[in-house]
Image (spheres, rainbow, N blue to C red):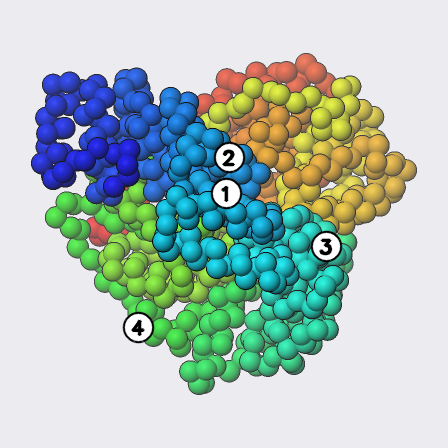
């Protein structure tokens, strides 16, 4: 037990004692904090957190209470909040060395060694006899490659705690590092790489390679660090050098392919994949890449046609050439489909039903060959004694991702009296959205190592209905969705593309967004939920802190916000921006470099050609910003004038956020649901005058908004009057629940 915790003796008896005290003295600091310690020691972390938060509200916590809260929050996976709790403990008791050490280790765990070192020094000054502070300081000094100083710190710690096994092991490590200084560089470089400190990783590994040849994984880490910093040419050259040194390492080819694909070089991707598939004939992923590669961005409309035709032909050929006779064949094919995604097919702007069904049936065949027991029809289980229907939701986007924002209301607003919600999370990223999903789930499962483990858990939960929120976003979800893990399985418009899988029964869509003939676009049965089909909470906007100058925008400009990722901007519509600029001389179109600067540069060259066709210089009108954090993104919305929707694949949550910032939205609905998100949103607001009937009409609306202040203000007044229709709409949730109930009880 921590030295700062009291001896609670028999925990069960102590718990009863403190609970009894709190019944009569609900703000007793001693009872409240001791009970929280007992909850912590018995791993009831949520109960401990609630008790301590209540103690803060009642002003009943001292340094020990905040320290305990820090421990609890770390166990709950909230290091940022834990750090603040440790700071609060230190503010109340500056001699609390354990709080310094825990706080420093939080900074160290995220790679901030500068701040960690500062905190550890403060801990040493607060309590020079605390051996742990010297151990932690030694760890920092090793990462700085200051081996002699690290050895001195560990020796001091050993004097304070003679014979300690951890300290002795650390001393042994630094003595070896002193003999081989290059190993110290590797140790530090690997630490920085693990903690995403990519600039430091590059500096250290480059220094190491000045003295000797590295292993293949060092080159891979170095190349990936360049890639993360969007220094793509250096990443490519590093992979190429590594392949020359280690021509039989498949991961190096995959890394090079990844960089080339990310930077919009599909021809090179296909060439290298073809070469690699010959060197590694058993690595089927290279064949997937060769046959089914799709660009992120296109130079012209002809490229779209070329790659669509190629994809269609190669998909047919690849299916024919991929054997599924032996167990090895089946496992290889499964490995391929678990790592491949055809996400960018939807960006071409066509009805993909036939291609998706062809791919989906093939995926199902591969999955059935590997897991025949998991593709059979399932009987609807009876409702349990509690009378609740068990609904499962699967996604890798239960965080502040577009998909997470769009789908959160389905989980948050379900009736807990009628439904148990089971969330299965295929990602490690966590934020406040993750916590909200978790809070409103009967069960929230995560940290899956493979789809077999996840499939077994889903089956064990004996669900009535399983909804895959976004089939196509992550490769491993597609083979999982090709199984039959629940009697009824659905997908949703959070990824607005048919799955093509015979195991997905329903597509949960929006009645306002779908065209008149939606069933022609889906292999699933379309379910039209009322209005937008979702329940979206009104965003909480920050106070503006940035000016137009911070975004390279003119104070007198008419700022048109164009914030979609570049795969949504098709080349046949580039001239729209130039046509608007020709009639609104003060126009500035602001884009964001998503997904990266390399794709942004390709878009920039394309848009320059479009403006040149109108005898205009795009540089006078177009600004491409680097990727923005959330606060800066909000600020950009708040200082813009008009939001221009993308053609073919419309904005969804970006449109909702723009409207929350009082921006009028211009849209031209496409033939497919994914091109009609903003259309549905504006229909809901009864702002149909912002919906274009053709491309020329889109230009007219955008120009009028930029030049007719009276008309624009009238639009904004109507937006202000009707905007509450968008937020926390419960009608889609009620309809969805009735739909689920019919499926289970009929």
Marks 3, 4: nearer the viewer: 3
**SS for tag 1?**
helix
Q: What separation in Å lies between label 2 and label 1 (alpha carbons)? A: 7 Å
Q: Residue at x 27, y 19 (%)?
A: 60
Residue 344 can be seen, yes or no: no
Residue that numbered label 4 is attached to = 373
| Image coordinates for residue 536, horizontal then vertical, percent | 44, 33
Depth check: give the residue in front, 285 or 613: 285
From what the image shows, is residue 515 above or below residue 359? above
**SS for tag 3?**
helix
Residue 457 can be seen, yes or no: yes
Q: Earlier in the sequence, mark 3 or mark 4?
A: 3
Displayed quadrant of residue 75 = top left
Question: Tags 2 and 1 in contact by the CB under 8 Å rule?
Answer: yes
Q: Residues within 10 Å of mark 1 (few under 14, many from 20)?
A: many
Depth check: give the residue in front, 345 or 424: 424
Q: Residues within 10 Å of mark 3 (few under 14, many from 20)?
A: many
Q: Residue at x 40, y 63 (%)?
A: 450
Question: Tags 3 and 4 in contact by the CB under 8 Å rule?
Answer: no
Residue that numbered label 3 is attached to = 232
Question: Tags 1 and 4 in contact by the CB under 8 Å rule?
Answer: no
Residue that numbered label 1 is attached to = 137
| Image coordinates for residue 127, horizontal then vertical, percent | 41, 32
Q: What separation in Å lies between label 2 and label 4 (alpha carbons)? A: 59 Å
From what the image shows, is residue 458 above or below residue 30? below
Residue that numbered label 2 is attached to = 121
Q: Quadrant of the N terminus?
A: top left
Q: Earlier in the sequence, mark 3 or mark 2?
A: 2
**SS for tag 2?**
helix
Q: What separation in Å lies between label 3 and label 2 (alpha carbons)? A: 39 Å
From what the image shows, is residue 629 above or below residue 208? above
| Image coordinates for residue 105, horizontal then vertical, percent | 45, 41
């Amino acid at each position: 037990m921590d030295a700062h915790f009291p001896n609670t003796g028999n925990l069960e008896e102590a718990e009863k004692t403190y609970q009894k005290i709190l019944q009569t003295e609900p703000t007793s600091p001693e009872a409240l904090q001791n009970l929280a310690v007992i909850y912590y020691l018995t791993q009831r972390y949520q109960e401990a957190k609630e008790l301590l938060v209540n103690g803060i509200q009642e002003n009943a916590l001292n340094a020990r209470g905040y320290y305990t809260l820090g421990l609890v929050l770390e166990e709950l996976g909230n290091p940022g909040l834990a750090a603040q709790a440790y700071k609060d403990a230190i503010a109340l008791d500056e001699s609390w060395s354990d709080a310094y050490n825990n706080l420093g280790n939080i900074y160290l765990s995220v790679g901030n060694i500068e701040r960690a070192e500062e905190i550890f020094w403060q801990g040493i000054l607060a309590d020079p006899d605390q051996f742990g502070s010297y151990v932690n300081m030694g760890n920092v000094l090793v990462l700085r490659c200051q081996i002699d100083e690290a050895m001195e710190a560990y020796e001091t710690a050993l004097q304070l705690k003679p014979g300690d096994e951890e300290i002795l092991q650390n001393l042994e490590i630094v003595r070896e590092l002193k003999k081989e200084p290059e190993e110290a560089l590797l140790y530090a470089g690997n630490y920085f790489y693990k903690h995403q400190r990519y600039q430091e990783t590059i500096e250290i590994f480059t220094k190491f390679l000045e003295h000797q040849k590295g292993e293949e994984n060092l080159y891979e880490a170095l190349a990936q660090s360049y890639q993360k910093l969007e220094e793509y040419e250096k990443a490519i050259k590093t992979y190429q050098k590594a392949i020359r040194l280690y021509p039989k390492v498949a991961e190096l080819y995959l890394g090079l392919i990844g960089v080339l694909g990310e930077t919009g070089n599909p021809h090179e991707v296909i060439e290298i994949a073809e070469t690699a598939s010959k060197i590694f004939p058993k690595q089927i992923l290279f064949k997937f890449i060769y046959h089914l590669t799709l660009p992120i961005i296109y130079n012209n409309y002809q490229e779209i046609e070329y790659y669509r035709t190629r994809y269609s032909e190669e998909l047919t050929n690849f299916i024919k050439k991929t054997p599924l006779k032996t167990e090895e064949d089946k496992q290889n094919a499964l490995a391929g489909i678990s790592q491949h995604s055809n996400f960018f097919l939807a960006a071409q702007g066509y009805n993909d039903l036939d291609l998706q069904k062809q791919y989906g049936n093939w995926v199902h065949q591969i999955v059935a060959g590997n897991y025949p027991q998991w593709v059979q029809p399932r009987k609807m289980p009876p409702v349990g004694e509690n009378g609740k229907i068990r609904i499962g939701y699967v996604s890798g986007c239960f965080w502040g991702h577009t998909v997470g924002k769009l789908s959160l209301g389905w989980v948050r607003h379900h009736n807990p009296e009628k439904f148990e919600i089971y969330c299965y999370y295929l990602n490690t990223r966590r934020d406040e959205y993750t916590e909200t999903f978790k809070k409103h789930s009967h069960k929230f499962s995560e940290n899956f190592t493979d789809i077999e483990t996840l499939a077994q858990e889903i089956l064990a939960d004996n669900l009535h209905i399983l909804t895959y929120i976004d089939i196509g976003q992550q490769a491993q979800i597609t083979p999982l969705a090709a199984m039959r893990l629940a009697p009824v399985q659905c997908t949703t418009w959070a990824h607005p593309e048919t799955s093509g899988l015979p195991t997905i029964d329903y597509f949960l869509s929006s009645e306002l967004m779908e065209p008149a003939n939606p069933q022609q676009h889906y292999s699933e049965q379309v379910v039209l939920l009322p209005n937008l089909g979702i329940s979206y909470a009104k965003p909480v906007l920050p106070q503006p802190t940035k000016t137009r100058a911070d975004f390279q925008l003119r104070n007198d400009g008419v700022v048109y916000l164009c914030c979609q990722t570049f795969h949504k901007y098709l080349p046949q519509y580039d001239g729209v921006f130039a046509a608007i600029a020709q009639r609104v001389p003060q126009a500035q179109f602001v884009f964001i470099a998503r997904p990266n600067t390399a794709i942004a540069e390709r878009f920039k060259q394309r848009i320059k050609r479009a403006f040149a066709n109108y005898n205009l210089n795009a540089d006078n009108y177009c600004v491409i910003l680097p990727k923005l954090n959330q606060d800066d993104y909000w600020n950009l919305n708040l200082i813009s004038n008009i939001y221009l929707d993308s053609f073919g694949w419309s904005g969804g949550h970006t449109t909702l956020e723009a409207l929350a910032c009082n921006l009028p939205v211009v849209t031209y609905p496409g033939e497919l649901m994914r091109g009609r998100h903003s259309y549905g949103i504006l229909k809901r607001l009864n702002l149909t005058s912002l919906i274009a009937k053709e491309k020329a009409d889109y230009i007219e609306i955008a120009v009028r908004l930029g030049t007719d202040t009276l008309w624009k203000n009238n639009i904004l007044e109507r937006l202000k009057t009707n905007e509450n229709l968008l937020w926390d709409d419960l009608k889609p949730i009620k309809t969805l629940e009735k739909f689920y109930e019919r499926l289970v009880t009929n």
